C-alpha cells in the first residue's frame, strides 16, 4: 500500500499506518525516506488492507493507493513499453480491485494520473509528468487499459514519477481516495480574504465534510463563533457561506470582515468567552498548546455551546503522532456524545492538523 503525505511528516504517517494495519490484523511494516512525502506499507495482504483501511480514516495521508509495480532503469526514449508490460504482468493485484471482474484481462482504468511527490526533488518533475501523461493516455487506450473518457465507476491508474528513469504504478478507487493529483486540492483562495488562512478553512470544509453536509450545515441563517478570529480569514469563509459570525479576538479585523453586517466583533479572549445561547458552529485557529485547545473545544461540546466545530491542533516538534492520538482521545472523552470526529493534516496545514466534530 502506498500513501502520500506532507514532506517531513513521513514518520507520523508511518506510525499511523503501522497502528491502523495492526488494528485490522495485518502484519507488516512501513517504509519511507525522510522528506520524500511518500510512505509504503509492506505486507502480504496489501490489497485487502487497502480495502479495509478507508482513506477518510487516515489523518496524515494526502492520498491512499495500492501499488503494484516499481519500474527502475527506464530508457528515457521509451518509458511507455515498460508500463504496458507491467500492466500485463500485474495479474492478481489488478483483478483483486476490479469489482466483479473474473479475469485481469477485463480490467480497465477510468482515468490516468501521472504525478510526483510534493518534495523539492519531486516538484522538478512537473513538466515530465505532464508530457508523459499526454503520451501515455493514447498508448493505454489502444489495448483497452484505459477508457476513452474518464469513468468514475472504475479505478484510476496512478504513475508516480521518482525521476526520468524510475517510476511506480498504483491504483486507487474513486470512492476511497483523494480526487486531486498528489492529494493536493486545487482550490482558489477565497476572493478578498483578509488573510491566507481563509484557504485553510475552505480546504477543511471541502475535505472533512461531505457534499451533503456542506449543503445542509453551511447556509444562510446559521450562527457561528470564530475564536481567535483576527484578522478575519476564517470569519470571511463563513460569511461567504451565509452565516452570521461572532468574531472573538482582542486584535483588529481587516476589511471586508471589519464592519460587515453579518459580523459582530467582540474584543475578548477566545479561551474565556462563551455564547449567551447555543450556536450552530464554532471554529478556532488559535496558536496554543494542543492539549489546552482540545480541552477548550471539548468544553464547548460538553456545555452544549455548539453543534459543529472545526479547529486546529498545533503539534510539537517531537512525538507528533503520540500527541495527535492523545489530544483526539482527550477531546472525544471530554466532549461526550459525538456523532462524528474527523481529522486531517491539510495541504494548507503546516505543523498542525485540522479537526471536524459534530454532536
Image (cartoon, rainbow, N blue to C red):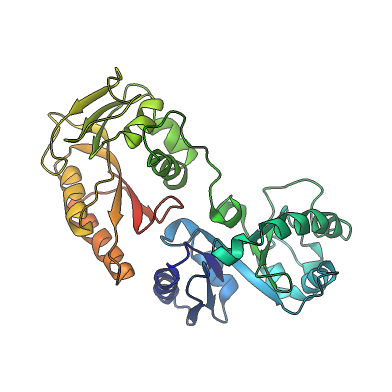
Left or right position of 295 against 258: left
The x and y percentages for residue 331 are 22, 55
Instruction: Decide: is 150 above or below 315.
Output: above
Where is residue 18 shown, x and y percent of the image? 43, 76
Quarter of the picture containing the C terminus is top left
**Residue 1 in view in this figure:** yes
**Vertical side of 288 occupied by 198: above or below:** above
- State left or right for residue 93 relative to residue 131: left
Given residues 236 and 103, the one toward you in this image is 236
- Which residue is found at the position 18% from the left and 43% from the top? 300
Q: Quadrant of residue 131?
A: bottom right
240 with respect to 147 (left or right): left
Q: Residue at x 76, y 56 (%)?
A: 133
Residue visible at 43% across and 59% down?
A: 57
Q: Is residue 103 visible?
A: no
Q: 101 or 276: nearer the eye? A: 276
Relative to 307, residue 325 above or below: below
User: Which residue appears farthest toward the top when viewing the image?
Assistant: 261
Amino acid at each position: 500500500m502506498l500513501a502520500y503525505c506532507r514532506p517531513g511528516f513521513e514518520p507520523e504517517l508511518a506510525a499511523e499506518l503501522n497502528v491502523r494495519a495492526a488494528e485490522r490484523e495485518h502484519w507488516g511494516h512501513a517504509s519511507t525516506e525522510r522528506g520524500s512525502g511518500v510512505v509504503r506499507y509492506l505486507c502480504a495482504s496489501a490489497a485487502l488492507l487497502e480495502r479495509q483501511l478507508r482513506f477518510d480514516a487516515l489523518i496524515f495521508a494526502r492520498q491512499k493507493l495500492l501499488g503494484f509495480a516499481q519500474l527502475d532503469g527506464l530508457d528515457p526514449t521509451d518509458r511507455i513499453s515498460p508500463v504496458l508490460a507491467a500492466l500485463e504482468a500485474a495479474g492478481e493485484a489488478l483483478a483483486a480491485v476490479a469489482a466483479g471482474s473474473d479475469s485481469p484481462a477485463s480490467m480497465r482504468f477510468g482515468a490516468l494520473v501521472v504525478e510526483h511527490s510534493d518534495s523539492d526533488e519531486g516538484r522538478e518533475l512537473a513538466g515530465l509528468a505532464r508530457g508523459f501523461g499526454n503520451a501515455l493516455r493514447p498508448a493505454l487506450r489502444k489495448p483497452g487499459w484505459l477508457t476513452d473518457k474518464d469513468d468514475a465507476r472504475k479505478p484510476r491508474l496512478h504513475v508516480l514519477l521518482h525521476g526520468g528513469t524510475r517510476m511506480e504504478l498504483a491504483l486507487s478507487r474513486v470512492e476511497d481516495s483523494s480526487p486531486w493529483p498528489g492529494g493536493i486540492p486545487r482550490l482558489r483562495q477565497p476572493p478578498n480574504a483578509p488573510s491566507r488562512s481563509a484557504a485553510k478553512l475552505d480546504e477543511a470544509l471541502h475535505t472533512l465534510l461531505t457534499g451533503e453536509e456542506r449543503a445542509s450545515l453551511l447556509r444562510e441563517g446559521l450562527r457561528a463563533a470564530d475564536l481567535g478570529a483576527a484578522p478575519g480569514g476564517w470569519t470571511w469563509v463563513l460569511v461567504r457561506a451565509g452565516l452570521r459570525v461572532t468574531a472573538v479576538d482582542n486584535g483588529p479585523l481587516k476589511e471586508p470582515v471589519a464592519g460587515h453586517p453579518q459580523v459582530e466583533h467582540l474584543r475578548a479572549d477566545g479561551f474565556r468567552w462563551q455564547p449567551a445561547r447555543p450556536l450552530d458552529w464554532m471554529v478556532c485557529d488559535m496558536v496554543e498548546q494542543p492539549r489546552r485547545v482540545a480541552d477548550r473545544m471539548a468544553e464547548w461540546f460538553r456545555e452544549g455551546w455548539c453543534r459543529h466545530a472545526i479547529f486546529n491542533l498545533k503539534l510539537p516538534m517531537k512525538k507528533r503522532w503520540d500527541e495527535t492520538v492523545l489530544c483526539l482521545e482527550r477531546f472525544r472523552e471530554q466532549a461526550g456524545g459525538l456523532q462524528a470526529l474527523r481529522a486531517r493534516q491539510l495541504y494548507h496545514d503546516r505543523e498542525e492538523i485540522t479537526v471536524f466534530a459534530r454532536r
